[in-house]
Amino acid sequence: MNSISVTQTLDTQGLRCPEPVMLVRKTIRNLTDGDVLLIIADDPATTRDIPGFCQFMEHRLLASETAHPPYRYWVKKGL
């Protein structure tokens, strides 16, 4: 269990690529720099897509749990 303080949670379970990343992008736009978004997903593509999104959009992937679904990603807006 992670002890990261979460600002908002986004549950994308049941959605398939590219929908989870599209929702992450839309949701993170409404957050303030430094806010943390917890993403819950069950699409295996997110194990590649979420880290790639963070690098491309210059957000920080603080932690992830991807051993088995549902996967969890803690993303901090901004670097």
Image: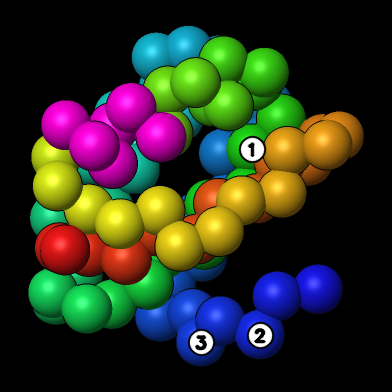
The amino acid pointed to by label 2 is: Ser
Q: Secondary structure at mark 1?
A: strand
For residue 50, which quarter of the picture?
top left
Of all residues, the one furthest to the right in this rendering is 68
Residue 28 seen in the figure: no
Residue 48 in picture, x, y percent from top left: 49, 21
**Residue shown at 16%/63% (left/top)?**
79
Q: Which residue is mark 3?
A: 5
Disc nearer the start of the sequence (2/1):
2
For residue 54, which quarter of the picture?
top left
**Residue shown at 40%/53% (left/top)?**
61
Q: Which residues make up the magenta segment?
A: 51-56
Relative to 36, residue 64 above or below: above
Real-space Cα separation, disc 3 to disc 1, in angstroms: 19 Å
In this rendering, would 32 be left or right of 22? left
**Residue shown at 51%/87% (left/top)?**
5
Q: Secondary structure at mark 2?
A: loop
